[in-house]
Amino acid sequence: SDSQTNTSLKEQYDKGARAFHIDTRWKRTGSYGNYEYELGVAIGGSYNTTSGDNKYMTAGPTFVEALNTITQNVKSDEYMVLMCTFAQNSAEYNGADGWMNAISTACANNDLVYDAKNLTSSTLVGDVLNKVLVIINMEGEFASIPSGSKCLFINAPMTIANADEFKTNLSTSIYKGADNVTKPTESGISIYNSHAQIS
């Protein structure tokens, strides 16, 4: 089912989805001088957002809630994949990498997220059963990543600056972190992608 509808993650899972894409945006609640912030899920603009170019959500689920729903549904004989992006024209909170840090923190607190620091090109499907692999799409050059993050990282642009870019560059390397190291390293794994569609 179209993930940009109000179809719940559980309904999508029941229909067979095992790979999800969550577009995140900061959720701001409270009043001026007393705002609270959580990373939220931008679902097709169906949740209220503040006006202006840099938007906050004012309603809707948090990323932690969505991640918990996904991980609670993974079965012992399967694995799932979650791709995370940052919604265009979103307001930044805690700096440009704040959303990435929030995802890494949520994953660190969820035992069903696979620790991708252990992932290599020799990893077998059986090694990741009953787990969710979380990939953060940086959509830009890597500078640093959260130290010790369990997530994988990729630079798969969702906007095309050069129309010929994807005619020659069809595969993209996946990176991972390490404990106490903020510079990502190649995992030895590549994925094939074309524009925003990733397989």
Image (tube, grey):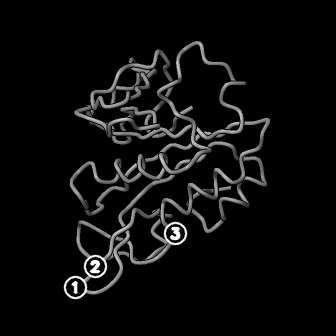
For the residues bearing labels 3 and 1, Cβ distance under 8 angstroms: no
Compared to residue 93, the image places residue 155 above or below, namely above
Q: What residue type is labelled 3?
A: Pro
Measured Cα–Cα span from mark 3 to mark 2:
17 Å
Quadrant for the N terminus, please. Answer: bottom right
Q: Which of marks 3 and 1 is nearer the N terminus?
A: 1
Toward the bottom, the furthest residue is 31
CB within 8 Å, label 1 to label 2:
yes
Give the distance between the C-alpha atoms of the residues marked 3 and 1, in whole angstroms.
21 Å
Residue 80, located in which quarter of the rendered image?
top right
Please report the residue visible at 55 percent of the width from the left and 63 percent of the height from the top: 65
State the residue position of label 3: 61
Local packing at callout 1 (Cα closer than 10 Å; few below 14, some 14-19, many 20+) is: few
Q: Of 152 and 60, which appears nearest the observer?
A: 152
Location of residue 62 in the rendering, given as x and y in whole percent from the top left corner: 48, 65
In this orientation, which residue lies closer to the viewer: 132 or 26?
132
Q: Which SS class for mark 1?
A: loop
Of 21 and 120, nearer the camera is 120
Q: In this view, does 69 lie to the left or right of 139?
A: right
User: Compared to 60, does 176 lie above or below?
Assistant: above
What residue would you read off at disc 1? 32
Measure how far apart labels 1 and 2 are at the Cα level.
6 Å
**SS under mark 2:** loop
